[in-house]
Amino acid sequence: MQNYEVMYHKFFSKKIREIRKANKLSQEKFAEKLDCSREFISRLENNKEKLSLRLLLKLAHVFNINLKEFFEK
């Protein structure tokens, strides 16, 4: 089970970076939109922080993304 957890965290880290770059935002501007710190975004993108359901829902809302898109490769 633990291997799947690591795999999903890496997947979401990459997805978050893709969303940020697709919106042409710096980590700082991305963090402002999500009401968190730039350091937190950096840790998420570098797989040092886990993505919470709350932040996932906020990402979907702020960037008008269907939650299904987070799970597509």
Image (spheres, rainbow, N blue to C red):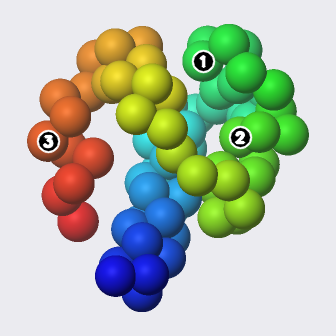
The three-letter amino acid code for the residue at tag 3 is Lys
Q: Position of 73 compared to 46: left or right? A: left
Q: Position of residue 41 (x, y in %)?
A: 71, 40
Which residue occupies 68% across, 13% down? 35
Q: Position of residue 73 (x, y in %)?
A: 23, 65
The three-letter amino acid code for the residue at tag 1 is Leu
Q: Residue 4's quadrant in the figure?
A: bottom left
Q: Position of residue 17 (x, y in %)?
A: 56, 51
Q: Position of 53 compared to 34: left or right? A: left
Please rate how many residues cluster around mark 3, counting C-alpha atoms within 10 Å: few if below 14, some from 14 to 19, many from 20: few
For mark 3, what is the residue?
68
Q: Residue 64's quadrant in the figure?
A: top left
- Say if 63 sits above or below 50 in the image: above
Residue 55 in sight in this render: yes
- Say if 43 sits above or below 69 in the image: below
What count of labels does the image hold? 3
- Is the residue under label 1 in contact with that under label 2 (CB below 8 Å)? yes
Report the Cα–Cα distance between label 1 and label 3: 19 Å
For mark 2, what is the residue?
41
Which residue occupies 22% across, 54% down? 71
Residue at disc 3, secondary structure: helix
Q: Residue 29's quadrant in the figure?
A: top right
For mark 1, what is the residue?
34
Report the Cα–Cα distance between label 2 and label 1: 9 Å
